[in-house]
Amino acid sequence: MDLSMFRKSAPGVLVPISGNDPVLGRWEHQAFVPTPLPTVEPPLSGKTYRMVADARAALAALDSAARQLPNPTLLRLPTLRREAQSTSALEGTYAPLAAVLVADDEDPPTAELLEILNYVRAANHGFAWVGEGRPVTASFLSELQGLLMRGTPLESVSGRLRDSQVVIGRRAHADPRDFPVHQARFVPSPEGVELGAGVDALVTWLREDHRGAIDPVVAAAMSHYQFETLHPFRDGNGRVGRLLIVLHLVGSRVLSEPTLTVSPWFEARRGEYYDRLLAVSTSGDWDAFVAFFSEGLRQAADSTHEEMRALVEVQGELKAVVRASTLRADSAHALIDLAVANPSFTVRKVEADLGISYGRANKLVGQLCELGVLDVVDPEAYKRRFFAPRVLDVLTARPQV
C-alpha cells in the first residue's frame, strides 16, 4: 500500500503491522484503522445534498409502488437473485444471470451457483431479522458471512471475524517482486483488538437513532464505507457490505420491502466504486463518495421500479392468456403468481404452495405449458423445473444502469 496517499484529513490512523512471507521473509508495513463514525453528517456540497434528495425521492417512489402491490413480497425472489448474481460478480464469482434465475437452490450444479445462491439465503435471513425489528449486531454480521460461505472451501474459517491480516487489490505499478502487503492497493485494519473494536463501534452506531442529524441515504453510505474499510471477514465483505445497504434502508424505514437491487449499478462502475471508497480513507473525501453512492441508489431505485412495473405487466398478460383459454380454475392464476415470484420451480413446490394434490399440480403445470405460459428448464433432467419465459425475458433484458 502506498502510504504517501494518506493525508492529515484521513478519517483514521495508520498502525504498524508485520509478518513473515514464506518466500521473501520478514516484512513490516502499516494498516489503516478508521476512526468510529461521527454522529453528524460529514460536510457535503449543495450538489451532493441535491443528489441525496433525488435518491430519497426515487426510493420513496419504489417503496410506494411496492406498497400498492396486492402481495408486496411477490417480486422479492426474482430481484434478489439478480442482486445475488451482480454482487457475487463484483467479488469474482460469476455465473450467467439466466442460469442463476433458473437454478435449483436445493442442488446447485456448480460451485459458483452454490456461492451465489448462498447470498439469497443470507439476504432472506437478514430481511427476516430486520423485519422483526432486531438490531444489527456483530454476531449477526458474522452469521450472514457464515451463510455466504456455507459449502465453500472457506466454510471452516467463516462465521467469525478474521484472525489474520488481509490485503485488498494490487496497485497498478507495484513491483511484482515486492511483498504482497507492499503491492496492495489497500491494507485494512489488523486482526484482533483493533478489528473487534471497530466492528463493535460500527454496530453501536447502527443501533443509534440518527434521524434529524444524518439523512438515511447519507447514513447508509457512511456505514457501507465503514464496513468495507474494516473488511472484517476473510471473504464475502463486499457482499455483506452491499446487503447492509438494503438492510439499513429497511431498518431506517426508507423501504418497507427490500426489492432494491444495488449491485448491478456498482458492478458496472467497479473501478470508480473502489476509487471513491479509497478516497475517503486517504483524504476524507466524503462528498465525492456520498454523491457517487446517492447517484447509485437513485438509478438503482429507478431501474428496480421499472423492472417491477414490467413484471406486474407480464403477470397481467399471462393471466389474460389463461382467461382466454378453457381454464377457469383460480389455481391457474395462483400458479402464474408463483411463476412470477419464483424464476423456476418444481411441481412439488406448486403442490405445496397452492395446497393442491400432486396430480392436480402436475396437470396444471402441463396445461400452462401447452398454453405457452410455462416451459421446462431441462427436459432431460430427473427433477424437472419449470419457468415462465416471459418472466425470464424481463429479468434478463434489464438494461445496464
Image: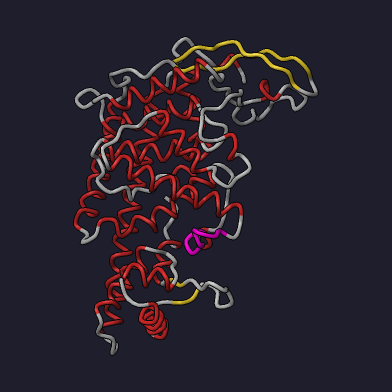
| Residue that protrudes farthest toward the front in the picture | 357
Horizontal side of residue 319 vs 244, given as left or right: left
116 relative to 348 in the view: left or right: right
Front residue (pair 289, 34): 34
The image position of residue 343, as x and y in percent, is 42, 64
The picture quadrant where one finds residue 215 is top left
- Looking at the picture, does residue 158 appear above or below residue 199? below
Residue at x 35%, y 46% (from the top left corner): 299
Q: Residue at (25%, 82%) from the top-left corner?
A: 329
State the image coordinates of residue 293 (x, y, percent, origin top left): 38, 35
Q: Along the horizontal axis of the image, is 184 left or right of 82? A: right
Q: Give the residues drawn in magenta, as a range.
A: 100-108
Classify residue 378 as left or right of residue 126.
right
Q: Residue at x 36, y 47 (%)?
A: 300
Residue ranking furthest to the bottom: 326
Would you say residue 107 sits in the magenta stretch? yes
> How is the structure coloured here?
secondary structure
Question: Residue 132, image x and y in percent?
Answer: 27, 41
